[in-house]
Image (tube, helix red, strand yellow):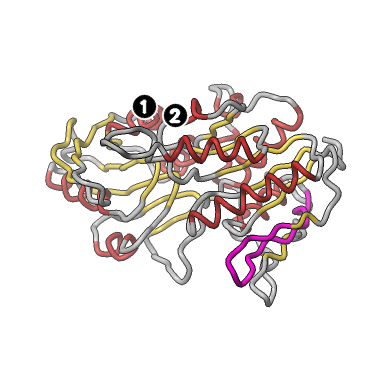
Amino acid sequence: MRADSIDVYTGNANPELASKIARYLGRELGKAEVFAFANENIFVKILDNAREKDVFIVQPTSRPVSTSIMELLIMIDAFKRASAGRITAVIPYYGYGRSDKKDQPRVPITARLVADMLQVAGANRILTMDLHQGQLQGFFNVPVDELTAVHMLSNYIRQKGTENLAVVTDLGFAKRARTFAELLDAPLAIVEKRREGNDDHAEVLNVIGDVKGKRVVIVDDEIDTAGTLTETVRAIEKAGAIEVIACATHGVFSGPAIERIDASTVQEVIVTDSIPMPAGVSSPKIKRLSSAPLFGEAIKRIHLGESVGALFGKEASMAEEMVFWDGEHAGLPSTANGNGRAAIGVAGAKRRAK
């Protein structure tokens, strides 16, 4: 990797994750100003020379969703006008992913709209993780690399023991959950659920498969309000499960999610750090694994023209072993100054994950 040819930048959506990615790569975060004026107009200024650089912008489109999307679009435009050689939007969590089809009269396909905006802004490539549906890749006319946290999450579960284990998911996540179950050598059961209206409530109707007397792992792509999760926990306990833990790639934790998790009988909820925890919110039941080495390794491979898919090949154990990376506990400098603006340019310690 040429030291002067790759740069990692971030907006305000998840600067902590971006700092860890930069540390994994043994680099410093690129310097930029990203803030909003009093009239809520977002301003971006790149403080480094970006001409002909391979630029990676780390910005999940999570809360506040509209602000995160606009920051990303404006940063892409700024780099395009600064003559960057290639611009890759690193989107650990792709917001509006559930709005991927016209399932009611007179509704938009917002996931496609966001994809169009990213391309018009000037993104040459997209790097993301566990889209709500894999078909979302088809909304883009630029290359899309979709990573998955399935190997990392399954390895964490494996360390806790796989004896008498069963994996439970819903139909939407069944394909990736099957891979998850195979990695753990555990049977897969499906929960049938029904969602009426446009609220966040889903009713669990049935559990298809045998969970009686089993230690159950619920797996999904995201946990939002935790309504479906707690309904699923009740359903599988009613079906005879003796222990329940849950894992998901994205911990959105909107509204009453934390209260619902704490009040439920689920023993542990494992997520990645693709989205920061809501401010001032915590729970002893929630375990967060760092996705930084996974993104860092993918960024390095994209830059060098190497295979990203090899990260998840049968011969590669790197994606599973990343759960042991200690970046979660390493000290990081603050990423905001006294004015509330992003002081983007945090120095990352030049070290690599072991």
Residue 345 horizontal/vertical position (percent): 76, 59
Give the residue at x 27% y 42%: 216
Q: Are marks 2 and 1 in contact (CB under 8 Å)?
A: yes
Of 137 and 223, the residue lying toward us = 137
39 inside magenta stretch:
yes
**Helix, strand or loop at disc 1?**
helix
Q: Please, is residue 17 above or below residue 170 in the view?
A: below
Instruction: Give, as a three-letter code, the residue at label 2.
Output: Gly
Instruction: Give, as a three-letter code, the residue at label 1.
Output: Lys
Q: Marks 2/1: CA distance?
A: 10 Å
Q: Please, is residue 308 above or below residue 337 in the view?
A: above
Q: What residue range appears in magenta? A: 27-44
Give the residue at x 77% y 48%: 26
**Helix, strand or loop at disc 2?**
helix
Q: Which residue is mark 1?
A: 175
Q: Which residue is mark 2?
A: 134
Give the residue at x 34% y 63%: 255
